[in-house]
Image: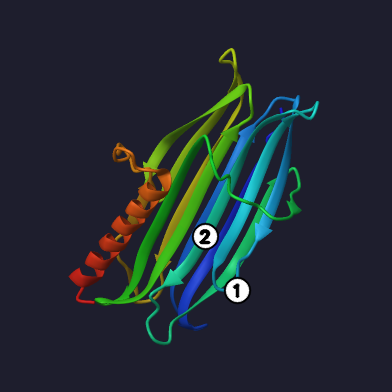
Amino acid sequence: MPTPKTKRIIVLSSSYSPSNIIANLNLTMNATFATPSNITTVNVTEEASSSSSESSEYSMTFNLTSGAAVGQITLSFSGEGEDLASGVGVAKTSATTTTVPRASSGTVTPIPSPNAAHSRVWSQPALDGASELVDQVAGLDMRVTAASGYTVTQTVTSWDDDDLIVAYEWKDVAGGTIFSGTVRLEAVAAAQGSYTLGDVTVVDDPPQGAQRLAGETRRALRERIREVAREVRARRREARGG
């Protein structure tokens, strides 16, 4: 049974200098599926990252061997350091990508009208005493669709702050499972030397147990969630006295 995947691992290091490292942020995005022999997978990646941040897009398209479409997932993966204190820089010290089958490079457009979608924004500051030196931020946006004659379901199986797992399952018109898999975002920061870490802030869209407001579009919901994240982070900084 084929096991197509798209996996990306990066390390972002914040520092004053190569000998004065503040913290390392380790991020892993892992999309893995189990497909039958009559399903083929096409992987496409689009890399728009810099030496100090992550910004990459991925598409996995699933088709029958006859060429008929079954479904697609797009993934938008990001990581960076925000609100840098004077003299602090961020460098991407490690980056690896594993795709099965081997991905081609191309333009990846996130699915505009998905059947299901989930996104997470994760952040954790690195501190020198009470002073925030950098806010380490990561994000993953997942969007899936099913072709005509199929359906796809999305279930969050882990809401842990440092380990989000979302399961997907495609079914045929009779309700039989065609294939399934998971997408996982792991985020772990480690302070170096005498530096410390603040509290983790996680904002999911849609949030656990929350519903959209009456008549609220997904775009409006996303902006509402982002505003909540901004407010939470602002209060966190105010509580530390700036």
180 or 163, nearer to the observer: 180
Q: Position of residue 7 (x, y in %)?
A: 62, 49
Left or right of residue 139: residue 30: right
**Residue at the location (42% across, 49% down)?**
219
Q: Residue furthest bottom?
A: 87
Instruction: Quarter of the image for the N terminus: give it.
Output: top right
How far apart in space, not on screen, are marks 2 and 1 (Cα)?
13 Å
Q: In the figure, 226 relative to 128: above or below?
A: above
Q: Residue furthest front?
A: 215
Q: Which mark is residue 78?
A: 2
Can the viewer see residue 78? yes
Q: Position of residue 162 (x, y in %)?
A: 40, 51
232 or 90, nearer to the observer: 232
**Quadrant position of residue 216:** top left
Left or right of residue 177: residue 137: left
Q: Which residue is mark 1?
A: 51
**Residue at the location (30% across, 36% down)?**
209
Task: Specify which label sits upstream in the sequence, 2 or 1.
Answer: 1
209 or 96, nearer to the observer: 209
Disc 1 crowd rating (10 Å Cα; few below 14, some 14-19, many 20+) is few
Q: In the figure, 72 relative to 195: above or below?
A: above
Numbered disc 1: secondary structure: loop
Numbered disc 2: secondary structure: strand
**Residue at the location (41% across, 72% down)?**
82
Mark 2 is on which residue type?
Ser
